[in-house]
Image: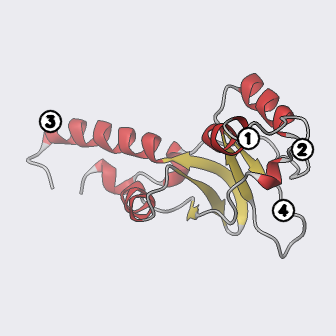
C-alpha cells in the first residue's frame, strides 16, 4: 500500500483563525484577508442550528466590486456561500479530491467530530497527491 493511501485531509488543511461575524463589512473582510494573506474567510454561525459560510475574494469581486456596491455598507453575509461542503479531517485526500470535483468546488471546511478545525483547497490536496504519487512511483509500478 502506498503512502498516498494514508494522507488525510487534516494533513493538508489550513487551520484558520476564529470565524468572522456575518455582520462584518466587506471592507473589514478584505482587511483581514490581506493581513493574513489568505483568499477566504469562514463566516460564523448565528447559533447551533445554523451553518458556517465562506466568503472568497472572487465572491467580493463578482458580487460587490463588479456591481459597484459599497465595501462599507455590504456585509459579508450578503455575499458569502452558505451552507458549505464539509470534509472529515480523517478522510483520505483522494476522496476529498473526488468530492470537491463532483461539486466543482475549490475549497471545503474541515470538521473533526463535529468541530470546525480548518479549510482545505482542491489545489492543496491535488498538489500533495501528485507529490506523493511521484515519490511512490519511484519505488513501485504505481496503483
Question: Under tag 1, what secondary structure?
Answer: helix
Front of the two marks 1 and 4: 1
The answer to whether mark 2 and mark 3 are in CB contact below 8 A is no
Residue 89, image x, y percentages: 57, 58
Depth order, front residue of 83/13 = 83
The answer to whether mark 1 and mark 2 are in CB contact below 8 A is no
Sequence-earlier tag: 2 or 4: 2
Disc tally is 4
Q: Where is mark 1, residue-wise? A: 64
Image quadrant holding the N terminus, namely: bottom left
Residue 68, image x, y percentages: 75, 36
| Observer able to see residue 21 | yes
Q: Where is mark 3, residue-wise? A: 138
Query: In the image, what residue occupies the spot 13% across and 50% down?
Result: 142
Question: Under tag 2, what secondary structure?
Answer: loop
Q: Where is mark 4, residue-wise? A: 45
Q: Where is mark 2, residue-wise? A: 24
Depth order, front residue of 112/31 = 31
The answer to whether mark 1 and mark 3 are in CB contact below 8 A is no
For the residues labelled 1 and 3, the Cα–Cα distance comes to: 48 Å
Image quadrant holding the C terminus, namely: bottom left
Q: Residues within 10 Å of mark 2 (few under 14, many from 20)?
A: some
Amino acid at each position: 500500500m502506498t503512502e498516498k493511501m494514508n494522507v488525510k485531509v487534516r494533513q493538508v488543511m489550513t487551520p484558520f483563525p476564529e470565524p468572522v461575524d456575518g455582520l462584518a463589512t466587506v471592507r473589514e473582510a478584505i482587511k483581514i484577508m490581506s493581513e493574513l494573506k489568505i483568499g477566504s474567510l469562514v463566516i460564523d454561525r448565528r447559533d447551533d442550528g445554523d451553518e458556517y459560510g465562506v466568503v472568497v475574494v472572487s465572491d467580493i469581486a463578482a458580487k460587490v466590486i463588479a456591481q459597484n456596491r459599497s465595501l462599507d455598507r455590504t456585509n459579508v453575509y450578503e455575499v458569502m456561500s452558505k451552507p458549505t461542503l464539509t470534509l472529515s479531517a480523517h478522510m483520505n485526500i483522494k476522496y476529498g479530491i473526488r468530492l470537491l470535483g463532483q461539486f466543482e468546488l475549490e475549497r471545503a471546511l474541515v470538521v473533526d467530530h463535529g468541530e470546525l478545525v480548518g479549510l482545505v483547497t482542491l489545489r492543496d490536496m491535488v498538489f500533495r497527491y501528485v507529490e506523493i504519487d511521484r515519490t511512490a512511483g519511484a519505488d513501485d509500478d504505481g496503483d
